[in-house]
Image (cartoon, grey):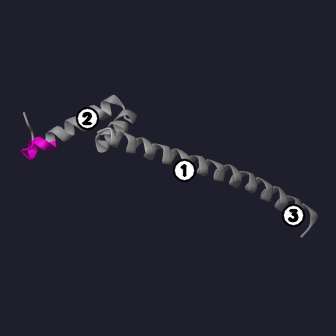
Amino acid sequence: MNQEAKIFSQTLGDQLNKFITRIEALEEEKAGIMSAIKDLFQEAKGEGVDVRALKELLKMRKMEQLDVQEQQSTLHQYMSALGMSHN
């Protein structure tokens, strides 16, 4: 291997190691955050909160208001078609 190839290989190796180290650190952080979220859901459940409804609310809060309204309208139409509407 010539000198230029060695330098390139070493530089690439250093660059890859930096990326890998940062990714591994973020993966550890992510695991800690996921554990904290799980603990919060358990706490909410322990206080009588319906966790499925809580997760649905979290999902809806990420959506645009128009998308939420369209989804609710479609759900209402489907429920009516199945005779499940309470109106």
Q: Which mark is residue 5?
A: 3
Is residue 66 shown above or below 20?
above
Residue 43's label in the rendered image is: none
Mark 3 touching mark 1, by CB under 8 A?
no
Question: Which of pointers 3 and 1 indicates the residue nearer the eye?
Answer: 1
Choose top left, top right, bottom left or bottom right for residue 12. bottom right
Name which of mark 3 and mark 1 comes first in the sequence. 3
Give the numbered dot on residue 31. Answer: 1
**Residue type of the residue flagged with mark 1:** Ala
Q: Residue pushed farthest front?
A: 46
Q: Residue at x 19, y 41 (%)?
A: 75
68 left or right of 82 in image: right
Q: Which mark is residue 70?
A: 2
User: Percent from the top left, x then y, of residue 69?
Assistant: 26, 32
Q: Secondary structure at mark 2?
A: helix
Figure quadrant of residue 61: top left
Quarter of the N terminus within the rendering:
bottom right
- For image coordinates 54% across by 50% down, the residue present is 31
Amino acid at circle 3: Ala
> Local crowd at mark 3 within 10 Å, few (<14), some, or many (≥20)?
few
Residue sitting farthest toward the bottom: 1
Q: Earlier in the sequence, mark 2 or mark 1?
A: 1
Dot 2 crowding, Cα within 10 Å, few <14, some 14–19, many 20+: few
Question: Can you see residue 60?
Answer: yes
Q: Real-space Cα distance between discs 2 and 3?
A: 58 Å
In this view, 65 is above or below 42: above
Residue 9, position in %: x, y? 82, 62
Q: Which residues are magenta?
A: 78-84
Q: Nearer the viewer, residue 44 or 18?
A: 44
Residue at 49% x, 48% y is 35
